[in-house]
Amino acid sequence: MLLVPSTRGRAHVVAAFATLLLVAGLGAWWWSARPPRPVRLPPLAPADTTSDRAVDRALDLAGVDSTVIKSRWHNEVAGFDVAGLGARRQELFLRFANAERCTCGCGYTLAGCRASDMDCEVSGPRLTALFDSVRAGRIRSASGVPARPARGG
């Protein structure tokens, strides 16, 4: 009589191990496929307006008026080639660009805002409309609009 070792006990162990590996693999897949948890950030501190006051105070102490800086004359408007306009129309465009304030909140004139921020979403379209109006002759007079300073700004 020949004795053959029983493989029945080993088959159960192998099946249990394979099932365990399958469950572990499915668990790992589920863990990696789930949406990420939102990151909880600490609440923001209230806006600090003291820094604005500190800047204004420093400018006052230095004898610099930011209104003067933001209102200074610009002989060119960045991004606009006025060479195709006649001298009179160039002057009209520059006078209006240097007189009208940008409404983006910067406090600069349209020309000043464009000089400091070429990507401003307010001054760009307003200057384009102004340029087109001057070029088409819809604006013919600058009465009441400040003229170019004698020294050029």
Image (cartoon, rainbow, N blue to C red):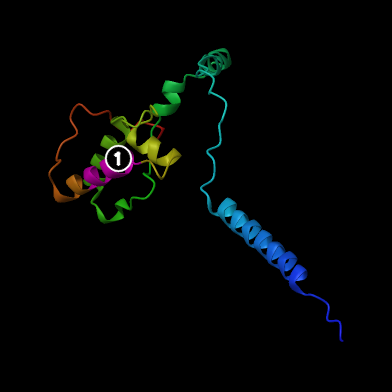
Residue at 28% x, 31% y is: 100
Badge count: 1
Image quadrant where one finds the C terminus:
top left
**Above or below for 9 versus 70:** below
Residue 143 is one of the magenta-drawn residues? no
Q: Toward the viewer: 39 or 131?
A: 39
Amino acid identity at mark 1 = Leu
Q: Toward the viewer: 119 or 16?
A: 16
Residue linked to disc 1: 94
Q: What stretch is highlighted in magenta?
A: 121-131
Q: Position of residue 126 (x, y in %)?
A: 26, 40
Instruction: Identify the element where label 1 is drawn.
Output: helix
**Above or below for 92 versus 40:** below
Magenta highlight: main SS: helix
Which quadrant of the figure has residue 13?
bottom right
Left or right: 25 as drawn, with respect to 115: right
Image quadrant where one finds the N terminus:
bottom right
Residue at 56% x, 53% y is: 30
Q: Toward the viewer: 37 or 101?
A: 37
Left or right: 22 as drawn, with respect to 99: right
Which quadrant of the figure has residue 40?
top right
Which quadrant of the figure has residue 15?
bottom right
Residue at 33% x, 53% y is: 81
Left or right: 5 as drawn, with respect to 76: right
Q: Where is residue 14 in the image (x, y as percent from the top left)?
A: 73, 68
Q: Toward the viewer: 149 or 34?
A: 34
Q: Position of residue 88 (x, y in %)?
A: 22, 44
